[in-house]
Amino acid sequence: MGFKAVIFDLDGVIVCTDRFHYQAWKKIAEGLGIPFDEEANNRLRGIGRMESLEILLEYSGRGPFSREEKEKMAERKNEIYRRLLASMTPDDVTGEARNTLAEIRRRGYGICLGSSSRNAGFILERTGLKDAFDRIVDGNQIQRFKPDPEVFLKGAALLGVRPGDCLVVEDAEAGIEAGIAGGMKTAAIGGAAACGKADYRLERLGDLLRICTAI
């Protein structure tokens, strides 16, 4: 298979917080009089908060908005999102996800979280997942967001492995593109599975165990 480490995205791969993102962005959109539905929300998957806001504002027919206005809107979205996240518990992580992470580590692979979310640490605390990863890289440690490969390249460096020895697991096409740009192998799950760009297509997270044989 040719890899020694697995780098996981968080939202949509290990936990499902899409509904919270949707609810928070919808609240911001309503305040601006912008129609916002699941299809519009799908455009925001896998990218940073400010980049998501710029896409949302395309629907407004207003502007230009000042940087200060945009920052206030982004912060308001995050406040709403974090309130929703506070309801999360360890029960929001499936047994399959926990068992897959533990078994891949047992088989000798380094495990890293590579998430663009600045709330990744909070989510890991709420769900009891902090100790499931050898290294963690999130949106607070990067300057460029997916499809830029920075988050994954930092993860590889922290694990002490070459990018080419890493497998990236992603549910967003932007994340698959980031893995490819970083010279890594990629496994797509969820929405990303339809993009046809990944090396592996997963029906469920446990399918990784067929790929990650003992090393």
Image: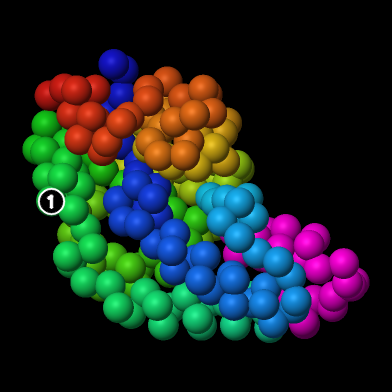
Instruction: Kindly identify the residue that appears in the image at 27 percent across and 36 percent down.
Output: 204
Outermost residue on the top side: it is: 1
With respect to residue 3, does 17 lie above or below?
below
Residue 92 placement (x, y as % from top left): 23, 63
**Residue under the point 20% across and 35% down:** 206
- Mark yes or no: residue 45 visible: yes
Which quadrant: the C terminus?
Answer: top left
Of helix, strand and loop, which one carries label 1?
helix
Is residue 126 found left or right of 21 in the rendered image?
left
Res. 210 image quadrant: top left
Task: Reply yes or no: does residue 99 show up in magenta.
Answer: no
**Percent position of residue 201, x then y:** 37, 25
Q: How is the image coloured?
A: rainbow
**Residue 117 position within the rendered picture, expressed as x and y whole percent measured from the top left:** 47, 61
Q: In the image, is 56 to the left or to the right of 190?
A: right
Q: In this rendering, is residue 179 above or below 96?
A: above
Residue 137 visible at all: no
For disc 1, the marked residue is 95
Quarter of the figure with residue 72: bottom right
Q: Where in the figure is residue 5, as x and y percent of width and height?
A: 29, 34
Magenta-tinted stretch: 48-71
Q: Residues within 10 Å of mark 1 (few under 14, many from 20)?
A: few
Q: Quadrant location of the N terminus?
A: top left
The magenta stretch spans residue 66: yes
Quarter of the figure with residue 104: top left
